[in-house]
Image: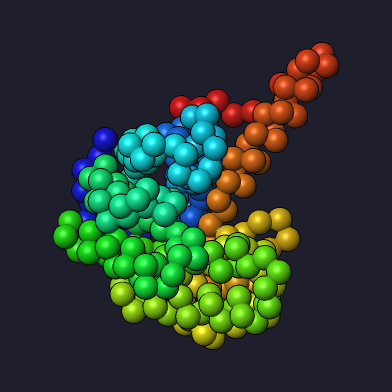
C-alpha cells in the first residue's frame, strides 16, 4: 500500500479548481487503474464503490465491509502515480474515521453520500470528513454528494432542485471542495445547479444520454465521473467476446496485451 501523499492531494485539489473540467475515470482494481492511468489525458482516477463491491461479490450500498473497500482503494492508489479519489458511500457509519483510514492507504479525495439524512446530520458527516483531512495534514478533496435527485421520486422538481442547492451550499460552507449531484440532468437543471451552488463547484456523473463534457465545461461544471458505467462497458465487451468464442469465433482483432 502507498503512504499519505500531500503532493497528490494538492494536485487533485488543483485539478478541481482549474478552469478546465476534470474527468475522473472510475476503476475498480489495480489493473483497471494501471490501464486507465496509461491513457493520454487522464489526470486523476476515482474508485467506483458499486464496481468494487460487485467484483468481490457484494451488493452495492455499504454491504461490503469497510475494510475490504479501503483495501481495494489502497491497491488502486498503489498501482498509479495519479491522485485517486475513493467512493466511500456514506462513510460506513463513521465517515471521519473511514476517510482517515483511506488517507492512510494513499487516497486523497472521496465521495461521501448524504443519503438525504436530515440536513444537520449530513452537515455533521461532511464536517467530520473535512476534519479528518485536516488532521492528516493534506488538502483532502471532499466531493460531497447529495442524493436529492437520486431520491427525488415523484416530488416537485423545483423542490428537489432547491434541496440540492441548499445542501450543496451547506456542504461547501463546512469545507467540501465540490458538490456531487448524481442523476440524468438536463441542461436547464445543470445551469440552475451551477447558478445556485457556484461555478466550478458542481460535480456530475455522466451516463448514457448525459450532456457532453464540452457542454458541461461551458456551463461551469467542475468534475465528471462515470460511476459503475466503466465496469459495465468492460463487462459488455467481455460478454460479447464470450458469446463470439462460444459460437466458434475468434478473439477480437486489436486486442492489446497488458503489461
Front one among 117 and 18 = 117
- Residue 189: % across, % down: 64, 77
- The residue under the point 60% across, 63% down is 151
- Would you identify the image quadrant in which residue 154 lies? bottom right
One can see residue 219 in this view: no
Q: Is residue 214 left or right of residue 114?
A: right
The image shows residue 190 at horizontal and vertical percentages of 61, 76
Residue 208 visible to an observer of this rendering: yes
Task: Classify residue 7 as left or right of residue 58.
Answer: left
Q: Residue at x 64, y 40 (%)?
A: 232
Callout count: 0
In this view, 162 is above or below 139: below
Q: Is residue 164 left or right of residue 66?
A: right
Q: Where's residue 234, x and y in %?
A: 63, 36
**For residue 88, side relative to residue 128 (left or right):** right
| Residue depicted at x 22% and y 64% | 131
Q: Is 216 rendered above or below residue 37?
A: below
Spot occupied by residue 121 in the image (x, y as percentages of width and height): 37, 67
Position above or below: 49 against 113: above
Which quadrant of the structure image shows residue 238?
top right
Taking the view exactly as shown, the residue that stands out farthest to the right is: 247
**In the orientation shown, which residue stands out farthest toward the front?**
118
Amino acid at each position: 500500500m502507498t503512504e499519505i501523499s500531500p503532493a497528490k492531494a494538492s494536485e487533485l485539489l488543483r485539478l478541481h479548481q482549474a478552469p478546465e473540467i476534470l474527468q475522473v475515470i472510475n476503476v475498480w482494481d489495480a489493473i483497471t487503474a494501471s490501464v486507465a492511468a496509461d491513457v493520454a489525458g487522464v489526470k486523476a482516477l476515482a474508485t467506483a464503490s458499486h464496481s468494487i463491491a460487485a467484483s468481490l461479490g457484494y451488493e452495492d450500498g455499504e454491504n461490503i465491509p469497510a475494510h475490504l473497500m479501503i483495501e481495494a482503494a489502497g491497491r488502486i492508489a498503489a498501482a498509479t502515480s495519479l491522485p485517486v479519489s475513493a467512493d466511500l458511500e456514506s462513510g460506513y457509519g463513521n465517515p471521519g474515521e473511514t476517510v482517515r483510514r483511506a488517507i492512510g492507504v494513499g487516497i486523497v479525495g472521496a465521495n461521501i453520500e448524504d443519503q438525504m439524512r436530515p440536513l444537520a446530520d449530513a452537515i455533521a458527516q461532511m464536517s467530520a470528513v473535512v476534519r479528518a483531512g485536516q488532521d492528516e495534514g493534506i488538502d483532502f478533496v471532499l466531493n460531497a454528494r447529495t442524493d436529492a435527485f437520486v431520491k427525488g421520486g415523484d416530488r416537485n422538481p423545483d423542490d428537489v432542485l432547491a434541496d440540492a442547492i441548499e445542501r450543496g451550499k451547506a456542504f461547501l460552507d463546512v469545507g467540501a471542495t465540490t458538490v456531487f449531484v448524481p442523476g440524468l440532468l438536463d441542461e436547464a437543471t445543470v445551469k440552475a445547479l451551477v447558478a445556485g451552488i457556484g461555478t466550478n463547484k458542481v460535480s456530475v456523473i455522466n451516463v448514457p444520454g448525459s450532456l457532453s463534457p464540452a457542454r458541461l465545461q461551458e456551463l461551469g461544471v467542475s468534475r465528471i465521473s462515470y460511476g459503475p458505467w466503466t465496469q459495465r462497458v468492460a463487462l459488455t465487451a467481455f460478454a460479447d467476446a464470450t458469446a463470439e468464442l462460444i459460437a466458434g469465433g475468434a478473439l477480437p482483432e486489436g486486442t492489446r496485451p497488458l503489461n
